[in-house]
Amino acid sequence: MDLKSIPTRYQTPAAAMFALLLGAAWLTAWGWKQRATDVVIERELQRSIAVATSLSNVLLPRYLDDVRRATRTPAAAVGKLDFLKALGEDVTRQVRGQRMIKVKIYDPRGVVVYSTDEREIGGDQIGNQAVQNALVGEAHAKLVRGSNSGEVVDVDDYSRDLVQAFVPANPGTTGKQDAVFEVYADVSAVMADVRQDAHTVWAVANLAGLTVFGVALMILRRAEEAQRRKDAVTGLPGREDAIKAMTELQKNHGAGEPLRVGWLIVGVQRLRQVSAAYGHRVADEVLRQAGIRLSGVRDAGLFRLGGEAFALLVVDRETTEGDEQLAERLARTVIERFESPIESDGHFIIADLAVGIALGRGRMVGPDELMNRAEVSLTEAKRQGTGHWLLYVAGLEQGVRERLQSLRGLREALEHKQFQVYYQPLVGAKTRDLVGCEALLRWKHPVKGIVLPDAFIPLLEETGLIVEVGMFVLREACRQAVVWRKEIHAAFAVSVNLSARQFADPDLLKRVRQILDETRLPADALIVEVTETFLALEPDYAASVLAELRKMGIAVAIDDFGVGYSSLSSLRRLPVDILKIDRSFVSQAPHDPVDASIAQAIAALARGLRLTLVAEGVETEAHAEFTRGIGCDKLQGFLFARPLDVKSFEAAYRPAQDVLSRSISA
Ligand code: C2E
Ligand code: CA
Ligand code: CA
């Protein structure tokens, strides 16, 4: 389960939303700023037009005749007309105190008949579009930057803001305009103000935006953090919150009040198998429903520790029960809740629970330490098996620590190639000819010497290392079988043990196929041995994987048959080729009538189902006699050979060195 993926799921759309909102706000602010400026400019334009209009209303009636006369005068001579001086004085009077810095009057031809800048008088502006527009009766104004003195009187400064306004002057008459008035107003101060205001507003808006953004980011982070702490599958708070909750409890605990706190950690086992068998979704659903079942146990908090573990915060203020009683009562309540299978996606799954408990008085032991202790208890409980619970007692870590040490040893063994495969021969029951062998793992320990698998396979399984080691055994065995099929016996087959844990590996089939391809061992020369226990646990899933293996041409054997719990009827549905009667029946059968009849029943079953029957643990002639007698096809045991390393195996069976002159069947 990838917990890291959860916060980002919420993060991206949230961030996008914020970005969008902020962008919208920013645009709005920008729009406001623009509009505010536009309003001011518009007002200034209208004002300039109004001023120009009133100027023309005052002046034109007084000078109408003069202007008309000027219109009939050639442009070059206009400057010499006598009324200009009086008009100039009049204009100066009129515009005094105004922000007007230039006034021009055009006659209907577009010739400048008057300008506050004398140099312009007599200039022909008929090509000027603005003047033309005004001449047909259209008043208009625009904001311009100050220009050099050639254009604008008294202004030598490009940084000035000016409003240039044109108004047609047509007092009383209709049709053609008598003149056009052009004025320039200096609006620098106003514009500076408006710019300053806009700037301030803008800065404030941006600052506010940034603050909002910062705050939003912080809230997002917090939410994300909380989400991260919350488990995505069960929606439960996680370890951090669990520790916090107990810390809080202990902090508020008044001295003298009775208080017992602790953790009850529930480990849901075999989830990996469930996931491999039915997929992630089903496994997640099992977890989710486990969370629901657990949430009803106590009012106190329930947390998900990640992986397959839940933690219940135990709070007991009565403390009348002993620790052991309290632990037992709680553990039973929990375990009872999981007696019925969990339904998920049409599958009914029995959740294997193990429970670890640690209790402490008041504030004597901190939350973290209590959590460690409960986890140690859980590890031990898991080792004892499904449905077990354990209350922490001092020193429990010792065993766990030791196992951790041997685990380190196992990792090193894998790294330093200390694992070795031994091979135990199988012979035909009648002929006693070599027909194949079983690959059996050995650990060549640098100090302890050869270590037998019973001492380390359980730990390999517990930790999952068996997946890697198991593939090593398979590869070795296949490689070796190819050699021996050439040198010893063309129909030689090799059996390899697969542990239940290896079936939880979703790549199992792929890996097996790959190894067969790599080593070029024909699939029908490979037998995989699985135990009944595995078959009983997950019959449907087991059957599907075994069927796939058989489709590839691999034979399937059930190991240790007779001691497990698989019902005989389920055997019928399983894709199986071989039964291996457990050693215990073989060794007891010759003198124990009960074991003998069980062995006979198994043999009858194998016959009925047309399965090959193999006896293992054949140590004596009596064993061999008995097993052959009930119909075993192949025998395996110390009577013929112990598991041998490659050298000893070849010494015993390779034809050239066949000192015992065993006949090898063709
Ligand atoms: P198993 O699959 O039942 O293997 C047969 C065991 O019986 C072997 O023990 C073998 O040495 C022993 N045996 C054979 N003939 C006799 C006999 O005549 N008398 C007696 N008393 N014992 C006999 P070993 O090699 O110690 O292996 C023990 C178990 O470890 C195996 O039992 C198998 O379950 C497991 N194992 C061994 N190698 C592997 C492996 O590569 N992968 C996995 N998953 N399990 C393995
Ligand atoms: Ca076996
Ligand atoms: Ca066996």
Image (spheres, rainbow, N blue to C red):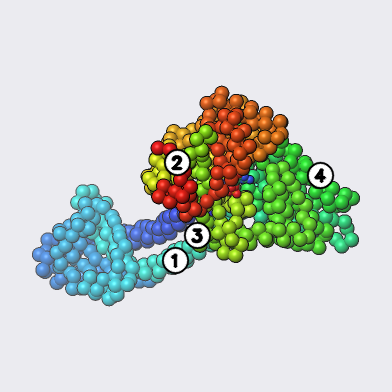
Disc 4 to disc 2, C-alpha distance: 66 Å
Q: Is residue 152 above or below residue 266?
A: below
Viewer-nearest of discs 2 and 3 = 2
Could you tell me the amino acid type at mark 3?
A: Lys
- Of the residues under marks 2 and 3, which one precedes in the sequence? 3
Q: Is residue 57 above or below residue 605?
A: below
- Write down the residue under mark 2: 663
Q: Is mark 1 within 8 Å of ligand 1?
A: no
Snapshot quadrant of residue 159: bottom left
- Of the residues under marks 3 and 4, which one precedes in the sequence? 4
Viewer-nearest of discs 3 and 4 = 3
Viewer-nearest of discs 2 and 1 = 2
Q: Is mark 4 within 8 Å of ligand 1?
A: no
Q: Which mark is residue 417?
A: 3
- Write down the residue under mark 4: 329
Could you tell me the amino acid type at mark 4?
A: Arg
Side of 335 where 97 appears, left or right: left
Q: Which mark is residue 199?
A: 1
Secondary element under disc 2, as helix, strand or loop, is: loop
Q: Residues within 10 Å of mark 1 (few under 14, many from 20)?
A: few
Contact (Cβ within 8 Å) of mark 3 with mark 4: no
Q: Residues within 10 Å of mark 2 (few under 14, many from 20)?
A: few
Rendered-image quadrant of the C terminus: top left
